[in-house]
Image (tube, rainbow, N blue to C red):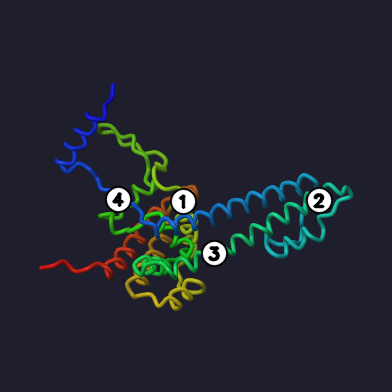
Amino acid sequence: MKTDRRDAEKLARCYRAGELTAVWVPDAAHEALRDLVRAREGAKKDQLRHRHRLGKFLLRHGKRPSDAGQAWTAKYVNWIRTHARFEQPALNATVAHYLEEIDHLAGRIVKLEEAIDEAVKQAAPEIRAVIEALQALRGVAQTTAATVVSELGSLSRFQNPRQLMGYSGLVPREYSSGNKTQRGAITKSGNAHLRRVLVEAAWTYQHRPNVQGRVLHRQKALALGEEAKKIAWKAQQRLHKRFTAMAARGKNHNQTVTALARELLGFMWAIAVDAEAKFKLPKAA
């Protein structure tokens, strides 16, 4: 039995009662930036996949670097090019193929990052302002900030940080009933691309608070406002303190960082709301 008429009547009653929640529809500019950022993410995943394949191939044939430093640094790749040689031509061809794919993907990533730089420069002023302001935070460079803005759109559409945290899927599941309270793993009900960059950024807060290096360079180069820098400093202090406290209790590091990522999103909301407020027209009297 067709239920279109019944569904329409139910929606009309919910709308009249104010029970419907408005959703954000991205415009063409947001969709274009989002597709570009996701293309870079796909290239990074492909690069990691080929690196794993080459690394496992070398281990399978007993090729273990002892003095090549960390994996996939320039020194490590030079060691592979110099010492990963075999008697069988087929094995040498396999190594050459993997290295060629890795080099090709590295070039793709560079081109995509250059395209993201250009897209951010040509973006609308309100989008560019939020992307720049978010870079005051530790662990949030331009690509991460562009990912957050392209996936979420206007952060001020959320009434408070808790709504945004729930939307992201970084909040725990709820199994409570009556007087019993029970929570589980995170819901993962939101945007997976957003959660990935938040968790990556949250790892930087295991280090003691400071404003130097890349963070200081971004804040000076972008001429960020005092409010954004104040919120970013508060985020460093609070999140590092939480990381230290949870680690002292023996909490799993992955769970700790996920909790930090949830709170980091709240600080992003505060910075974005402040940046977006400068572009909102004053209400008429």
Residue for badge 4: 163
Q: Which residue is mark 1?
A: 193
Image quarter hosting the N terminus: top left
Question: Camera-side residue: 239 or 281?
Answer: 281
| Total residue callouts | 4
Residue pictured at 84% horizontal, 47% vertical: 90
Relative height, residue 35 to residue 274 (above, below) = above
Residue for point 72% across, 65% down: 75
- Of the pair 24 and 138, the residue shown nearer to us: 24
Q: Position of residue 101 (x, y in %)?
A: 69, 54
Is the residue under label 1 in contact with that under label 2 (CB below 8 Å)?
Answer: no
The secondary structure type at the circle numbered 2 is helix
Q: Which residue, given by chain and number where applicable, does mark 3 sit on?
A: 113
Image height check: is 202 above or below 61? below
User: Looking at the image, which residue is at 30% across and 35% down?
Assistant: 176
Q: Identity of the amino acid at label 3?
A: Glu
> Which residue type carries mark 2?
Ala
